[in-house]
Amino acid sequence: MRSIIPLLSLSTLLVPVQSLYFYIDGTSPKCFFEELPKDTLVVGHYTAEEYDDTRKMWSKHDGLNVFISVDEVFDNDHRVVSQKGSSSGRFTFSAAESGDHKICFTPSSNSGGSGWLSALHPQGGIKLTLDLAIGETSAIESTDKGKIQDIVKRVKDLNGRLQDIRREQVFQREREAEFRDQSESTNARVVRWTLVQLVVLGITCAWQLSHLRSFFIKQKLT
């Protein structure tokens, strides 16, 4: 195996952030042991590459995947991380208790080439570049901060829309109240005008009856 470091603890290699690369024999897992204090945050970024005979260079492709696992050695290999990712990605975990943690990487490829199955070939195997940050939260905080800012922006947009809807509802209620007042005022005027007409009609009828009565009385006397 052409690994640039042996299979041993990274405690002497991994200061807060350390970048390294190594080669993996096909589907054989590559594991490292790291002793972590309790509540230590670990952030890892990885990139897997397969040698392209046509282009004569290391490159990524969609068919290259990496399975990542983290086991707590002190707790009967209790697995705290088990994820399958693409040729590049990241993983995070926090040490629940102090002790050794085994971090393993297992690649798989559907490129159809046989060279990736063995790193003994001068241009075979999988090249894995790893950036590991131990006890650093800035990477996660920056990402989470961006996500939180995006969520806050969406919430503000929703609040703005809700305010617009509320203003529209208040405006509609005001228009409804104004229309109701106008309708009630119009109905009241119609009722008053009807009453006035009835009074005028009654007075007119009474005057006509009185006039006719006087007329008939005069006719009878004559």
Image: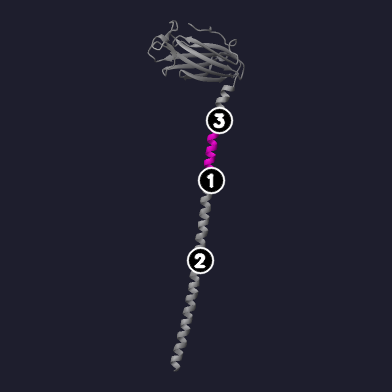
Q: Residues within 10 Å of mark 3 (few under 14, many from 20)?
A: few
Colour mode of the rendering: one colour
Query: Which amino acid, by three-letter code, is at mark 2?
Result: Arg
Count of marks placed on residues: 3
Q: Is residue 88 above or below residue 221?
A: above
Q: Going 48% across and 9% down the picture, which residue do you hit?
A: 23
Which residue lies under the disc numbered 1? 166
Q: Is residue 154 above or below residue 96?
A: below
Position of residue 200 measured from the top left corner of the image (x, y, whole percent): 49, 75
Query: Which amino acid, by three-letter code, is at mark 3?
Result: Ile
Query: For numbered disc 1, what is the local secondary structure?
Result: helix
Residue range (magenta):
147-167
Position of residue 98 measured from the top left corner of the image (x, y, whole percent): 61, 16
Which residue lies under the disc numbered 2? 189
Q: Going 40% across and 9% down the picture, which residue do you hit?
A: 115
Which residue lies under the disc numbered 3? 148
Query: Which amino acid, by three-letter code, is at mark 1?
Result: Arg
Q: Earlier in the sequence, mark 1 or mark 3?
A: 3
